[in-house]
Amino acid sequence: MESLHLLFATSEVFPLIKTGGLADVSGALPAALARLGVDATLLLPAYAAVLDSAGSLQQIARLDLPQHGDVRLLQGRLPDGLPLLLVDHAGYYQRAGNPYLGADGHDWPDNALRFGLLSQMAAWLAGEQSPLPRRPDVLHCNDWQTALAPAYLHFYDRAHAATVMTIHNLAYQGVFPPTVLGALNLPQESFHLEGLEFHGMLSFLKAGLVYSDRITTVSPSYAREIQQEPLGFGLQGLLRHRRDVLTGILNGIDTEEWNPAADTRLWATYDAANLAGKARNKEALQQTMGLAIEANSPLLAVVSRIAPQKGLDVVADALPQLIQMGFQFVLLGSGERALERRLRDLTHAHPGRAAVHIGYDETLSHRIEAGADVFLMPSRFEPCGLNQMYSQRYGTLPVVAPTGGLLDTVTDATAARLASREATGFVLERLDAGALRSTLARVNELYRNKEAWLRMQRAAMGRDFGWAARAEEYLALYRNLLARQ
Ligand code: ADP
């Protein structure tokens, strides 16, 4: 069979630029598809950080677009060898800091243009006028930043790639005043209720959901949840209308990057057969974070964006009592200033028992996964979530809220699942400080039963969260889509 040409359009990719889970997926899924024989190319903005780290680049096209000015298309390779295309626009992408936010924590004011251009370039590459030696068979768009591409193809192109739109997080939709329509070179006729309009505004994500051939999201539970209030965030009606083309495919994790048996970032490596190295990581983590060095105090951890979605206010509510119950606590994260401050103040009030590190730190995130006993993920919603999978792989049992991908990837320690040795974590009954405390009382009890705990750790570490099986699901979806065209 002839190989399938895939263009994977995204606004972040590990290891070049990362703010969250989308980067991990973009770094791993196209590579896993390539291992299945797919001819996969990534499309990404040429952010300053990317230009610095992308290695040698070649200009393959240059355009002068009336709305955007001078745009260049650069070609290179990702560190793992996958072909990479970069949209280079000095004014849009070459600025310090986060891809989406300025130093003041607010969205860049020209985000509509920045990601409108990314979408338009994706559509160009996937359309009739594609400058690529072979036009892609499938254009795979990810989140709102690339979601206008199916609309450009719908309105301006007759023969173009099949389109897949993946929702990594429906809470971010890219909604802008309708005045950007002209600047984005979209026709007035696209701006209506069954098109790009969303309550009088222009919605990037809605464009992708309306005009793409297939919609996917990153877990089966989230695919169900977004068809209802409140997690549909206003798009539940549209998603219900398109449910025949909507599927949930779980994310995998990069099992090489996240492998406790070979992770060079750790103080000591370990595997399911011998967890001695995990105890050494715990001791080193306690020391680094200024916690009392106590092998037998259960250590709770959080690595997360500090955003309302992640439910860390509930952790803050419960923290004094958790510490009273004998838990230690570490948190690595950054985001909302007020909650950062609250968490920092709380931990200062409990020296030796709790510590926070505000910031983004890849190495520390691995060390925390290895050194902690329990990982907290009390998300209000979670499309898939990665950390609960990393945690299981590192023998750190997750405590999760009953939502989205967390439900699909963690097996609750019920009596039956403990007996059948399938239990790998703990699912809260509901999300509040009371439920968190009562579940952690259960955790505490099991933690004291060393044999039962070890059994759960081994079950968790034995789970296959790799991308291979997930990539097969995407490939089947692409093939099915192409067969119907
Ligand atoms: P989301 O994409 O909603 O932020 P996920 O659990 O899907 O949540 O992915 C989060 C990713 O970002 C994980 O790889 C996690 O380790 C990483 N991460 C989040 N905050 C930090 C941080 N402060 N330092 C290091 N890694 C972080």
Image: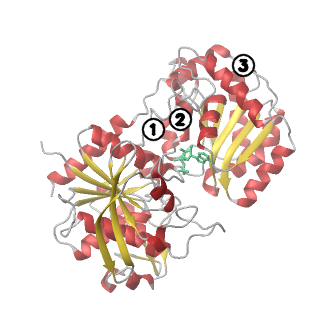
Q: Is there a contact, CB below 8 Å, between mark 1 and mark 2? A: yes
Q: Which residue is mark 1?
A: 253
**Residue at 34 percent of width and 84 percent of height:** 66
Disc 3 vs disc 1: which is toward the camera? 1
Q: Which mark is residue 448?
A: 3
**Residue at 43 percent of width and 62 percent of height:** 46
Query: Residue 446 placed where, x, y %?
Result: 67, 22
Of the residues under marks 3 and 1, which one precedes in the sequence? Answer: 1
Q: Amino acid at mark 3?
A: Arg
Label 2 near ligand 1 (CB < 8 Å): yes
Q: Which residue is mark 2?
A: 390
Disc 2 vs disc 3: which is toward the camera? 2
Of the residues under marks 2 and 3, which one precedes in the sequence? Answer: 2
Query: Residue 158 placed where, x, y %?
Result: 17, 71
Crowd class of label 2 (few under 14; some 14 to 19; many from 20; radius 10 Å): many
| Scheme of image coloration | secondary structure
Q: What is the tally of numbered marks visible in this picture?
A: 3
Secondary structure beneath disc 2?
Answer: helix
Instruction: Look at the image and tell me whether residue 219 can be seen.
Output: no
